[in-house]
Image (spheres, rainbow, N blue to C red):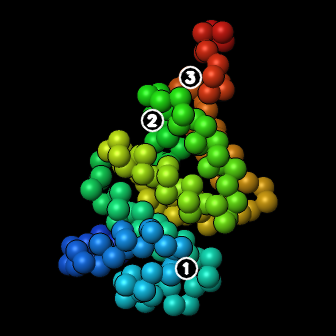
Amino acid sequence: MKGQSLVDYLKSVAERDSGAIAALGRSLMFEPGTYAPAFPVLESLVGSCSEEERRRVYLISGLWSRYGRRHDGNAQSLASAMKQLARQSESVAARFSVLLDADMDELSHRLRQAVALIGGAGIAIDWGSLYDDLRWWGHPDKNVQQRWARQFYSSPDGLVVSANQDTKNFI
């Protein structure tokens, strides 16, 4: 399943069944794919999927229903959204670093924290892209984590800086 297909499906569910969306939001209090009231909403989509993909669908659906459905503005990648938040708080860079280092077991918890920060700031996330990125999170080459790190730590003019380094030293 492609990420945008999932987002389109969630939007159609939200238009006709607010209770189903509420169940998806509540599912975030549990491990992805284990909250029974969310089963009627998503099991028809994930019935033939791997357990890993099933968990990913439940995680993104819960996050979208809780934090994303109200923000349809200029959608950004998660890394770009975190970078925007980091301009306001130094602790965001540390949180982002922990997220990048998360293994598959820690990912849902770390992602919930990051998305809660982003959603609380009213920043729109590109949910389809996020879902697609998570498909490759556990790859040994860590291509997704590297791409996210480049998006987060790169300055607008292309110079790569650390979270604590002053860009004036490069100009």
Looking at the picture, does residue 45 appear above or below residue 15?
below
Mark 2 neighbour density, 10 Å: few (under 14) some (14–19) many (20 or more): some
Residue 20's quadrant in the figure? bottom left
- Few, some or many residues within 10 Å of mark 3 (<14, 14–19, 20+): few
Tell me the mark number nearer the camera, choosing from 1 and 3.
1
**Helix, strand or loop for disc 1:** helix
The answer to the question of whether label 1 and label 3 lie on touching residues, with beta carbons closer than 8 A, is no
The mark nearer the N terminus, 1 or 3, is: 1
Residue bearing the label numbered 1: 54
Closer-to-camera residue (124/108): 108
Disc ID at residue 158:
none
Locate residue 99 relative to residue 78 in the image: left or right.
right
Tell me which residue sits at (56%, 90%) in the image. 48
Q: Quadrant of residue 157?
A: top right
| Residue at x 66%, y 66% (from the top left corner) | 105
Question: Tag 3, which secondary structure?
Answer: loop
Specify whether residue 42 is in view: no
Q: Amino acid at mark 3?
A: Asp
The disc label shown at residue 85, or none: 2
- Say above or below: 82 vs 134: above
Q: Assign a secondary structure to mark 2.
A: helix
Mark positioned earlier in the residue sequence (2 or 3): 2
What amino acid does circle 2 point to?
Leu
CA gap, disc 1 and disc 3: 39 Å
Residue designated by label 3: 157
Q: Earlier in the sequence, mark 2 or mark 1?
A: 1
Residue at image location 20% in from the left, 78% down from the top: 16
Q: How far from the left and from the top, in percent, is residue 37?
A: 37, 84
